[in-house]
Amino acid sequence: MSNIVNNLVEDYIRTTLKEKDGLLRELEEYANEHNVPIVHKEVSELLKVLLKIQKPKRILEVGCAIGYSSILFASVLDKDVEIITVERNEKMIEKAKENIKLAGFEKNITILEGDAEEILKEVEGPFDMIFLDAAKGQYKLFYDMVIDKLRVDGLLISDNILYKGMVAHDDFVIRRKKTIVKRMRNYLDYICNCDYLSTSLIPIGDGVALSYKNNKRGDVNA
Ligand SMILES: C[S@@+](CC[C@H](N)C(=O)[O-])C[C@H]1O[C@@H](n2cnc3c(N)ncnc32)[C@H](O)[C@@H]1O
């Protein structure tokens, strides 16, 4: 039960998804067995469609884990795509390196090792797409560090924004998650109301926010 979409609807949508094959499928199985949180299946399909439309050449990802989403991005995009992904967990980094090598994307995907709070300061833009998929309580902090590195017309994608429904309604909130929920609500309030982004919140997976960067800060737009 995701608290986000009616279970019957979610089950139905899952029946429509094509099974991945090869390494991506193996990584899904590994993630499942080892409780590694990777993008939900329906979110991965949405990302594939967005990538095919937008054709980003440079992507910044915050939260690499075992490399599943980076490998997914590289497998959909042109051979010259550059993906920079940040990860602080050493075991994840080791596994991600192995997987990226197995996938043959060592030239495309670079892992920056360490805490995003430090690393993002040093990362050089511009990026065509930024994918936030790390500590949910830190999204606003990550956002502040990366938004000027996203080019105009670029896409900011924030995953897990509804966090098991807790962000949408207090009835779902577990007491020890209150701070994260409050921070995520503040982040969503910000990206939905700031005048240089057009944002849509999508209730699939654990919730995804799509934000299109319109113009310079301060420009008025629809
Ligand atoms: C949801 S997983 C990423 C999943 C991955 N994007 C995928 O779909 O295959 C989140 C990852 O972010 C990492 N992480 C969380 N906070 C971080 C931070 N402040 N700096 C670097 N990595 C962080 C965690 O160690 C974890 O591996």
Image: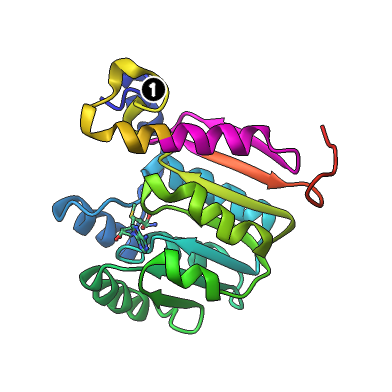
Dot 1 falls on a residue whose secondary structure is: loop
* Relative to 88, residue 97 above or below: below
Task: Give the farthest residue toward the left.
Answer: 33
Along the line of sight, the residue nearer the viewer: 34 or 190:
190
Quadrant location, the N terminus: top left
The extreme top residue here reads 171
Q: Residue at x 39, y 22 (%)?
A: 5
What colour scheme governs how the chains and residues are painted in the rendered image of this protein? rainbow
Q: In the rendered structure, does residue 195 fall within the stretch colored magenta? A: yes
* Picture quadrant where residue 18 is located: top left
Q: Is mark 1 within 8 Å of ligand 1?
A: no
Vertical side of 21 occupied by 169: above or below: above
- The spot of residue 108 in percent (x, y) is 51, 78
Q: Which residue is pictured at 32% across the width and 30% down the height?
A: 164
Can you tell me which quadrant of the image ligand 1 is in?
A: bottom left
Query: Measured along the vertical axis of the image, is residue 216 above or below residue 107?
Result: above
Q: Which residue is mark 1?
A: 5
Residue in the image at 85% along x and 43% along y: 219
**Of residues 44 and 176, the one drawn nearer to the viewer in this rendering:** 176
Amino acid type at circle 1 is Val
The image quadrant of residue 134 is: bottom left
Q: Nearer the viewer, residue 168 or 121?
A: 121
Vertical placement of residue 215 versus 91, above or below: above
Q: Residue at x 52, y 39 (%)?
A: 187
> Which x, y percent locates residue 15?
35, 32
Q: Residue furthest right?
A: 220
Can you see residue 210? yes
Residue 71 in sight from this viewpoint:
no
Q: Position of residue 192 (x, y in %)?
A: 63, 33
Give the magenta-colored segment's residue range: 183-208
When asked about the image quadrant of residue 14, the answer is top left
Magenta run includes residue 58: no
